[in-house]
Amino acid sequence: MDRRQEKTKQAILQALIKLIDQKGLDQVSVSDLCQQANINRSTFYLHYKNIDDLLLSVEADFIREITDAIQDLETEDLIYNSQALTQLFTRILESIEKNSDLIITLMSPTTSPRTRLTIEQAIENIIIDRMNTAIIREATQEELPVSKTYIAVTISSLFTGIVAEWLLSGKKESPQDLGQFISEVATQPMIDRVLGLDQ
């Protein structure tokens, strides 16, 4: 994508955020977007089919950014190493912080439930995948008191809940500090307890 196309897509994205905040997603039209972004309709349709297609593209870009940010992290010792957990959570939080205006808007009551769930589920799925991989290396299902999936889902749900509060309260903590809190206080003790590593 050349610089001009990227600039146009950014203008459309900023217009979308502003309009959703002003009037809610259901009331945003292509005409509204074009007027707000100062582009013509043909330019919009060069990039997207409609508003739903724009949202899908935005969601996919965000998910790709998080995936790219953590792809080089080792998962093997994730459940033993709070520093590795902190690094995983911090990388995700940094991507969220970078896109915080967008994420706050997409997770707000003025957008659609589907969009909110998509963003939350995407973050949860990334964490579930990483945690399941680490837990599977450590223990068979027979050795665990509950399903491996429950462990990963609990951690991912806890993470997204804290992230939502962090965003709504103005991101007072840095991604590093919050990542460390989630790892050392909220996650590692539970992992140790379930896997018997605290004995």
Image: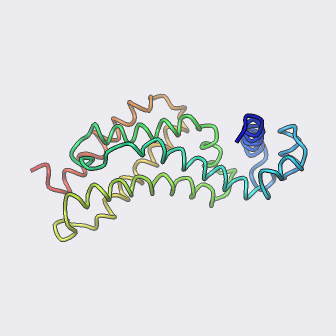
Q: Quadrant of the N terminus?
A: top right
Vertical side of 175 occupied by 25: above or below: below
Q: Position of residue 168 (x, y in %)?
A: 55, 38
Is 26 situated left or right of 198 in this image? right
Q: Residue furthest bottom?
A: 142
Q: Position of residue 167 (x, y in %)?
A: 54, 38
Is 19 situated left or right of 109 in this image? right
Q: Number of callouts in the render?
A: 0
Vertical side of 167 occupied by 136: above or below: below
**6 vs 119, nearest the viewer:** 6
> What residue lies at 26% left-to-right and 40% top-to-bottom?
82
Is 157 situated left or right of 142 in this image? right
Q: Position of residue 46 (x, y in %)?
A: 82, 51
Q: Residue furthest left?
A: 199
Q: Position of residue 98 (x, y in %)?
A: 56, 34
Asked where in the image residue 116 lies, by quadrant, the reply is bottom right
> What residue lies at 38% left-to-right and 57% top-to-bottom?
128
Asked where in the image residue 131 lies, by quadrant, the reply is bottom left
Q: Residue furthest front?
A: 2
